[in-house]
Image (cartoon, rainbow, N blue to C red):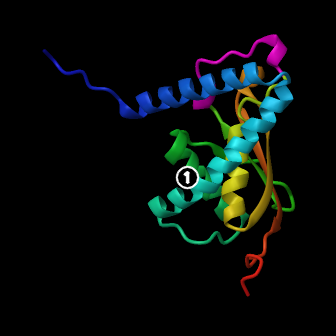
Amino acid sequence: MSRQRFDTKKVNSELVTLTYGTLVAQMVKDFDNPDDVSKQLDRIGYNMGIRLIEDFLSKTGTGRCLDLKDTADKIQSAFRLYLGVQPNVVNWSPAGDEFSFILDSNPLTELVELPEDLKQLKYCNIICGAIRGALEMVQLDVQSWVVQDQLKGDQNTEIRVKFIRRLEDAMPAGEE
């Protein structure tokens, strides 16, 4: 009997795609409103980002970000590490406080079609939440949102990130 060889990156990507699709489908059944599902996906992503940042920092050994460009480069590395895709960092604002990630292929949207009644669903909001959560853990307050979505007929998926402010290290209440 011969052994088949599997491309583990492809298998992992497909597993993530199918698992995520199942999660979203169940949430659509549980919530009446696609906007509520979008908010929940963002919240789940935020909680994932809070936990992923420690794993990312330990695996990559990277230090503190010097500026927003350095931050964008490290997020780009995280896309490669966790989703197996290399987004392009583009569309920097003139002030240098806002940029976009362009994904030519998005593993979360492979094998997915949104029905007409779910066109307002922000299917990739989990990524936006993960970016916000991870950056908050390194004292950066950002907004993140999907600008273009392949599931809605756009050529690529574009995720916009806007720097809001640097968070101050705070001591827990009662510990001074």
Q: Residue furthest left?
A: 1
Q: Is residue 3 magenta?
A: no
In the picture shown, does residue 169 fall above or below 79?
Answer: below
Q: Is residue 115 visible?
A: yes
Residue located at (57% from left, 30% from top) = 107
Quarter of the view holding residue 59: bottom left
Residue located at (83% from left, 13% from top) = 117
**Which of 170/128 is in front?**
170
The boundaries of the magenta stretch are 106-119
| In the displayed structure image, the side of residue 63 where residue 27 appears, left or right | right
Where is residue 67? Give x, y as percent. 70, 69
Where is residue 1? Give x, y as percent. 13, 15
**Which of 143/27 is in front?**
27
Q: Is residue 69 visible?
A: no
Quarter of the view holding residue 54: bottom right
In the picture shown, does residue 6 fall above or below 99?
Answer: above
In the picture shown, does residue 107 fall above or below 50?
Answer: above
Viewport quadrant of the C terminus: bottom right
As shown in the figure, which amino acid type bears the numbered disc 1? Ser
Q: Callout 1: helix, strand or loop?
A: helix
Residue located at (63% from left, 32% from top) = 104
| In the displayed structure image, the side of residue 137 where residue 31 appears, left or right | right
Q: Which residue is mark 1?
A: 77
